[in-house]
Every structure is written in structure tokens, then in C-alpha cells.
Image (spheres, rainbow, N blue to C red):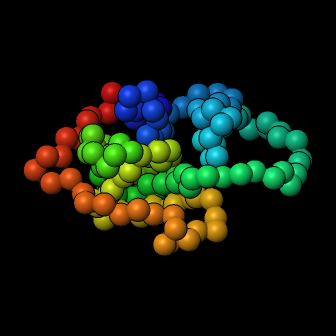
């Protein structure tokens, strides 16, 4: 299952749940995204042609992040571009999230191991704007659909 988190028609994140399955390949992101999220499931013997990726000049204006939850539980809090809290989701073993726009914060609910993938190089002072997190009493965790 793929879950799109949106605000006013703007995609904030895409969650690929661990139970998603289909044959073949499917990309969930539009070609305009600087980071692409896809899924592939092939039978034994399927071949993908040998290939290499060409150098193509791309202009990336904002870093998108992918988190792969290997173990544990993580709460993700979503904020719009004005830093207003919207809602939260829980991620568990095997879930993958692509953070596209807006703001986000996290709280570890069960010890977590995760892998983060994003474009580089990364410049801490230029790449992040920190802001106040939501009051814990106002957290709204939306359940998986």
C-alpha cells in the first residue's frame, strides 16, 4: 500500500508500507521529483539489462529524504510550509517514507534502526531550518488506511 500525505493539494510525503506487493515495477513519484521512489518485484530468472547511468546535469533546489525503517517504530510529525502541525503517522519494520515538502519531526516509539537516503553533499547550516515542534498533547496519529 502507498499512502500520500498531502496538505492543500501539496504532497508532503509518500509512505510505502511493508505489506505492499505487486508483480513488475512501479514508480510512485512524478518525474519532477528530485528523488524517485519505486518498487520492483520479479520472478526467478527475470533479467534487467546491464546498464550504467549517464552523467546528466540536474538542478536540485531542495533535498528530499528517504527513510527505510529496518527495525522498531517511529512517529513522523508533518508540518506545512508555514511550520504549522498537521498530523502524524507511525512507521514500523519495513516501511519506507519519502519526505517531499513541508516540515517534519520524529519521535522514536520503539528502539529504531533506519537508513536515510538523500541527495548530497549535505550542508547542515544551509539545508535545514529548525522550528518549534508540536505540543505533545496535540499529536494526532492517523492510522494506516
| Residue 96 seen by the camera | no
Position of the C terminus by quadrant: top left
Percent of width and height locating residue 104: 36, 52
Residue at (14%, 46%) from the top-left corner?
138
- 88 vs 68: above or below: above
Residue at (39%, 45%) from the top-left corner?
81
Residue at (23%, 41%) from the top-left corner?
141
The quarter of the displayed image where residue 122 is located: bottom right
The quarter of the displayed image where residue 7 is located: top left
Percent of width and height locating residue 4: 44, 32
Residue at (33%, 56%) from the top-left corner?
105
Q: Nearer the viewer, residue 36 or 21?
A: 36
Q: Does 15 sit left or right of 133 as displayed?
A: right
- 141 vs 59: above or below: above
| Residue 102 seen by the camera | yes
Percent of width and height locating residue 135: 15, 54
Q: Nearer the viewer, residue 135 or 1?
A: 135
Amino acid at each position: 500500500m502507498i499512502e500520500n500525505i498531502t496538505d492543500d493539494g501539496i504532497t508532503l510525503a509518500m509512505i510505502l508500507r511493508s505489506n505492499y506487493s505487486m508483480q513488475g515495477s512501479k514508480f510512485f513519484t512524478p518525474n519532477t521529483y528530485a528523488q524517485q521512489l519505486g518498487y520492483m518485484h520479479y520472478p526467478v530468472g527475470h533479467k534487467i539489462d546491464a546498464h550504467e547511468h549517464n552523467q546528466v546535469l540536474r538542478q536540485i533546489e531542495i533535498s528530499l529524504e528517504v527513510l527505510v525503517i529496518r527495525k522498531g517504530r517511529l512517529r513522523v510529525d508533518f508540518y506545512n510550509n508555514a511550520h504549522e502541525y498537521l498530523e502524524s503517522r507511525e512507521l514500523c519494520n519495513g516501511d519506507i517514507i519519502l519526505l517531499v515538502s513541508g516540515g517534519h519531526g520524529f519521535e522514536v516509539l520503539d528502539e529504531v534502526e533506519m537508513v536515510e537516503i538523500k541527495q548530497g553533499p549535505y550542508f547542515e547550516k544551509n539545508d535545514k531550518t529548525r522550528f518549534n515542534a508540536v505540543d505533545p498533547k496535540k499529536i494526532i496519529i492517523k492510522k494506516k488506511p
